[in-house]
Image (spheres, helix red, strand yellow):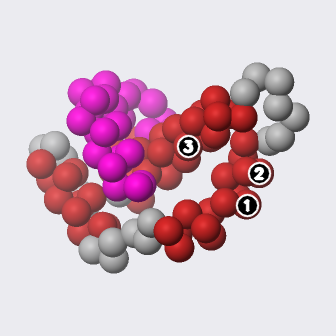
């Protein structure tokens, strides 16, 4: 599931992310851990998940969406295990975006 969210974010916002990677210190710092794709996976995908959980819970819910995400992580990994070679696919996505890793 993470892979599909990452792909969607990269395809929808690649130009904006590249632009911010040169100006924004947070995005630039993520370059150490995988470039734009690293930023997407470590920051944007989790934020998307929290936003979707918040929406599902509804405005009047007292439950913390981050806590719900943490509580459901093990079940999610059991039902939708990540593909082990996913890291290789992310690196090739960076290469396709014209970025180079140092």
**Marks 3 and 1, the one that precedes in the sequence:** 3
Q: Which residue is mark 1?
A: 71
Q: Is residue 69 above or below residue 47?
A: below
Left or right for 61, reference 42: right
Quadrant where the image shows the C terminus: bottom left
Against 4, residue 18 (above or below) is above
For the view shown, which residue lies furthest in the right direction?
62
Question: Mark 1 and 2 residues: CB-CB less than 8 Å, in contact?
Answer: yes
Q: Which residue is mark 3?
A: 49
Viewer-proximal residue among 13 and 53? 53
Question: Is disc 3 in contact with disc 1, using a CB cutoff of under 8 Å?
Answer: no
* Residue 67 image label: 2
| In-image side of 57 versus 5 (left or right) | right
Residue 30 visible, this angle: no
Q: Position of residue 28 (x, y in %)?
A: 41, 41
Q: How many marks?
A: 3
> Element at badge 3?
helix
Residue 93 at x, y percent in the picture: 20, 52
Q: Secondary structure at mark 2?
A: helix
């Amino acid at each position: 599931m993470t892979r599909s969210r990452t792909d969607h974010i990269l395809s929808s916002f690649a130009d904006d992310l590249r632009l911010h990677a040169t100006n924004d210190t947070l995005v630039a710092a993520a370059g150490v851990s995988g470039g734009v794709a690293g930023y997407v996976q470590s920051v944007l995908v989790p934020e998307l998940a929290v936003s979707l959980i918040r929406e599902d819970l509804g405005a009047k819910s007292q439950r913390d969406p981050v806590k719900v995400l943490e509580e459901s992580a093990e079940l999610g990994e059991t039902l939708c295990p990540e593909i082990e070679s996913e890291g290789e696919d992310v690196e090739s996505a960076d290469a396709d975006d014209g970025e180079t890793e140092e």
